Image: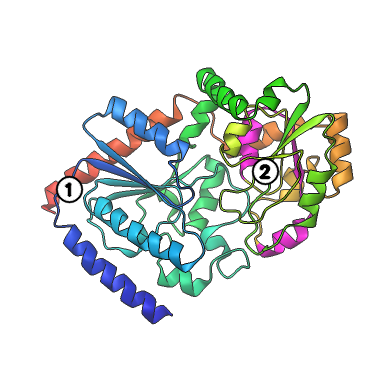
Amino acid sequence: MSFVIKIGILFLNILYSILKIFPMEKKIVYISRELDKPPVDFLLLKADIEKRYPDYKNVILCKTLKKGIVSKFKYILHMFRQMYHIATAQAVILDTYCIAVSILRHRKSLLIIQMWHALGALKKFGYSIVDKPEGTSKKIAKALKMHYNYSYVFASSEYCRKFFSEAFAQSIDTVKIFPLPRVDLFYDSTYKAKVCRKIYSLYPRLYKSKKKIIVYAPTFRKEISSPLDEIQQFIDAVDYDNYELIVKLHPIEQIKYKNLNAIFDTHFSSFEMFYVADIIISDYSAVIFEGMLFRKPIYLYAFDYKTYNRNREFYVDYQRIFDGLIYTDCAKLLESIDQNSYREDITENILEKMIQRKEKSYTESISDFIIHSVKQNQELNCERGV
């Protein structure tokens, strides 16, 4: 297997060396395999750079890597497109692992930034969980040079820097504090109104209903291949006479749950759905930090904590810092929701650690850093004659 991977990498690098003959452009490339459509963080950055630095071209490339031979073949074809744009760009922005970025030999002047798609630091990922049931094998990580070639990694706070350094196997000096651009949208009333209109247009019953809206966003569990009884039990146990339930599964989740009363949304992100939520429920997903920014009641339905912790582990003491928000029993969770026994003081303390406070636009700060770093790289390599 490793021999086949080495041959594949050699072939791609030969092809890439030819592509690097094409002239470099003042171009920033954004690559994601989290979604098949541009993530909001990329769109915000692109719009800001086009407005304030109009001489830079922006290209967004998004495609998920799904199971199956056909899907994998289509992704390989997509990789060739990635390679051309990377070869002719001055900067690449990622929100997840990108094979082409890690395995190829790039120009020294190329700026590569890992702007991970999740806020804060909760469950472990990357190199923190190699050879764990929820992680990648060490052999595959080494063969595919997982998370190689980064110039910088972004984290959302000083507290999170050490965790991101570990996850990406990067020097702590390369980890810079920049919360994601979408945090700006929490303070944007115009954007909120626009998103709410779209949600109510698609689901008019939410607009007309006098019921409280629960948004349930469970995390993706890699080792699970069939519906979890506890999740289905919760969905079925909700009192639909008094609540509307929106189930937001992870974008790459393949498992399906059923209930005619619930809304299983695939059109909006969890972040967008939080605008219309009265109550937010998750478990181990970093979306809880986004939910906390909304200052809405949050509950954690951690029915499989022991198993999940054994398979994945956490950067923080989950049971300690979220004590008072965690429920393992469906009935007790629903009772607490009915009684509105939410602990706001807990979430405020967590937010202080996980997300740096707003000084100015997060999007503008990142744009400025990218353009400054690109210019600095180009100047250094001109001096060296590269």
Q: Is residue 207 above or below residue 25?
A: above
Q: Amino acid at mark 1?
A: Met
Measuring 48% from the left and 47% from the top, which residue is drawn there? 35
Q: State the mark number for residue 217.
A: 2
In what quadrant of the picture does the N terminus appear?
bottom left
The question of residue 302 being in magenta is answered with: yes
Q: Which residues are magenta?
A: 286-311
Q: Nearer the viewer, mark 1 or mark 2?
A: 2
Residue at x 35% of width, y 56% of height: 78
**Is residue 211 toward the left or the right of residue 114 in the image?**
right
Classify residue 377 as left or right of residue 177.
left
Give how far apart the Cα atoms at labels 1 and 2 are.
42 Å
Relative height, residue 157 to residue 98 (above, below): above
Residue 325 position within the rendered picture, expressed as x and y whole percent measured from the top left: 78, 40
Looking at the rendered structure, the kind of residue marked 2 is Ala
Give the labeled residue for mark 1.
24
Q: How many marks?
A: 2
Task: Please name the residue shown 66% across and 56% down the image.
Answer: 255
The residue drawn where x is 34% and y is 64% is 103
Q: Earlier in the sequence, mark 1 or mark 2?
A: 1
Q: Within 10 Å of the Cα at label 1, are there few (<14), some (14-19), or many (20+) other Cα atoms?
A: some
- Furthest residue in direction left, as rendered: 385
Q: Position of residue 243 (x, y in %)?
A: 79, 31
Q: Secondary structure at mark 1?
A: loop
Seen in the picture, residue 2 relative to 96 is either above or below; the reply is below
Q: Secondary structure at mark 2?
A: loop
Q: Is residue 158 visible?
A: yes
The residue closer to the viewer here, 82 or 369, is 82
Q: Position of residue 279 (x, y in %)?
A: 74, 32
- Does residue 327 show up? no
Callout 2 environment at 10 Å: few (<14), some (14 to 19), or many (20+)? many
122 drawn magenta: no
